[in-house]
Amino acid sequence: MKFLKTTLIAGLLALTTAVHADSLFDDLGGKDAIARMMTRLVELTSADPRTAHQFEQTKKDRLARLLTDQVCELSGGPCKYRGVNMKKSHIKLGITEAEFNALVEQLQQAMDEEGVPFHTQNRLLALLAPMKRDIVER
Amino acid sequence: MAQSRTTLLFFLTILLIFSSPTTAEENLFGSGKILATPGVIQVEGTAGGGLTPWAVISGYGTNRQIGGSVHHTYVTTNDFTLNATGATVGLYDRLELSFTRQWFDTGSAGERLGLGEGFKFNQDILGAKVKIFGDAVYDQDTWMPQVALGAQYKKADKGAIVRAVGAEDDDDIDVYLAATKILLDKSLVLTGTARLTRANQFGLLGFGGPNGSSRSLQFEGSVAYLLSRHFVLGADYRTKPDNLAFAEEDDAMAAYMVWLPSKHLTVTAAYTDLGKIALQGRQRGFYLSVQLGF
């Protein structure tokens, strides 16, 4: 009985690892890599004149943590995003498509610096792209 | 006369657009789109692949910006040379206006056809394209493509000659509906375009003829793969009418590599097979297009 249980658990573990192995989360380099990229993204966003004005009131450490959880969860990692939804968190900011795209370019740079392959980057961007509907207001 | 009038109208429109009031906080010419998303300029001067128009709006302007480009395209096949020069303006990622002039040099084939060595068939193409619905870039969670409706007014300059070979007219309007979908997680860009046309060899040999005097429905398709941020590999296929009796007309295809070092420079190199043209056999060759823009 105990043997069966162990086998079952081992089997399940193997299965989850197998599923996990080709997840985007792992291809991005796991949570530490995502955290580094999000910290870098917030740095780039705050320094870029195209986007800096939208982040003047933002606590950078907190934003990087929230983004890490969000990207981690979205890519299939073991995290839970606990921030407010995209619509509420961007309301009345009047974010434009050009600002949204500037952030995409900053994210691409952060991913380049972390060595994330181009096609892996596109898999993440494909998950983030529909958020434009809730973020861009004009 | 008609040519210079359309040209004048085109530049007046541009002038009008550029002098309109702008928002203070945002750069109207800020190139806010993401690299490669406006495609390249196809052979008739509209945003697309090599031969096929895409549903995207030319230039790097977002919904609150204006974009534009100028291009020169050179195609050389077994017997012919085609040069095309043109400009596009993309307004608020909604409306695209374009103008292109094509010079089709018959080279030594001109002599064989009794036209004289280096005889040129030229045409002007004035294009307009409007995005109707969908968003190729952001709608990654649905199958809905971006769809655009376009028209191309084409005017061939050798009216008497194109009529002599059987064409009914030296000018006409092509109308097309293009659907483009970017599958970002696969790094693919897919386009299908349906065109109503009676153009012979894109319009260079006039419009209509003994084998077909009204517009017919033609299909164009395009598959592009994003190799890296700065390189795109693509292929286009395009069916064409076969209206003229003196010479058979085939479908055309192109396989191309695009290099995008920045939003301001795009270089397209292609291998193309335009099929049989004017009794000179199958025309295969190379295509090079250089595009500057914002």
Image: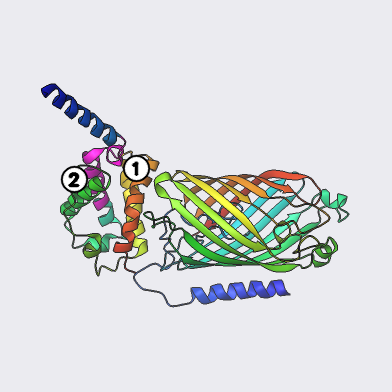
Vertically, is B126 above or below A24?
Answer: below
The residue that disc 2 covers is A79
Give the side of residue A57 with respect to residue B132, left or right: left
By secondary structure, the bulk of the magenta-drawn segment is best described as helix
Answer few, some or many: residues within 10 Å of disc 1's Cα (few below 14, many 20 plus, some between 14 and 19): some
Point out the residue furthest to the top here.
A3
Which label's residue is closer to the chain start, 2 or 1?
A: 2
* Chain ID, mark 1: A
Which structural element holds mark 1? helix
Which label sits in the foreground, 2 or 1?
A: 2
**Tag 2: Cα neighbours inside 10 Å, few (<14), some, or many (≥20)?**
some
Segment colored magenta: A22-42
Which secondary structure, mark 2?
loop
Q: Residue at x 18, y 28 (%)?
A: A8
Relative image position of residue B21 (x, y in whole percent): 43, 77
Residue A112 disc label: 1
Q: What amino acid does circle 2 point to?
A: Cys
